[in-house]
Image: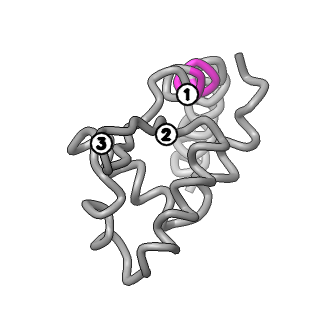
């Protein structure tokens, strides 16, 4: 399940690609041309970002006549969510311990 998460996070670590994915999540399937205003990039640059996202399994491409339409791959989102949730107890416990330590420190002043 988590096999490709390193490439997924690497792809999402670049701000333009992250913005592309956010737009697709918010607005649904779009063509590369629809995504041109995310950043001041040329169409070939947007295409390169989309190719990297496809190769990492983050987005899917569907061909409709002359257009290529992109959407977020649901399985990748599920894998990110599952990985994040697997560490939820750890982080919640750590934050609770930090809050108790801060409270103790403040009460000693």
Horizontal arrangement in the rendering, residue 31 relative to residue 89 (left or right): left
Query: Magenta region, mostly helix, strand or loop?
Result: helix
Of residues 69 and 106, the one nearer the viewer is 69
Q: Position of residue 11 (x, y in %)?
A: 63, 52
Q: Earlier in the sequence, mark 3 or mark 2?
A: 2
Kindly identify which residue carries mark 2: 59
Q: Is residue 87 found left or right of 15 in the rendered image?
A: right
Residue ID at (76%, 40%):
6
Please tell me whether mark 1 sits on a helix, a strand or a loop: helix
Q: Is residue 64 positioned above or below 22 on the image?
A: above
Give how far apart the Cα atoms at labels 3 and 2 are: 19 Å
Which portion, as a residue range, is magenta?
79-84
Spot occupied by residue 18 in the image (x, y as percentages of width and height): 48, 56
Circles 1, 3 touching at the beta carbon (< 8 Å): no
Q: Is residue 42 above or below residue 1?
A: below
Q: Position of residue 15 (x, y in %)?
A: 51, 66
> Residue beneath label 3, please?
65
Q: Which residue is mark 1?
A: 76
Q: Nearer the viewer, mark 3 or mark 2?
A: 3
Front in this rendered view, residue 106 or 57: 57
Secondary structure under the numbered disc 3 in the rendered image:
loop
């Amino acid at each position: 399940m988590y096999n490709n998460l390193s490439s997924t996070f690497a792809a999402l670590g670049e701000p333009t690609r992250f913005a592309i994915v956010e737009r697709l999540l918010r607005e649904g399937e779009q063509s590369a041309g629809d995504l041109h205003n995310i950043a001041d990039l040329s169409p070939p640059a947007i295409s390169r970002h989309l190719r990297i996202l496809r190769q990492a399994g983050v987005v899917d491409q569907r061909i409709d006549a002359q257009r290529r339409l992109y959407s977020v791959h649901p399985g990748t989102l599920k894998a990110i969510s599952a990985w994040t949730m697997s560490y939820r107890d750890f982080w919640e416990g750590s934050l609770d311990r930090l809050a108790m330590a801060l409270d103790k420190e403040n009460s000693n002043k």
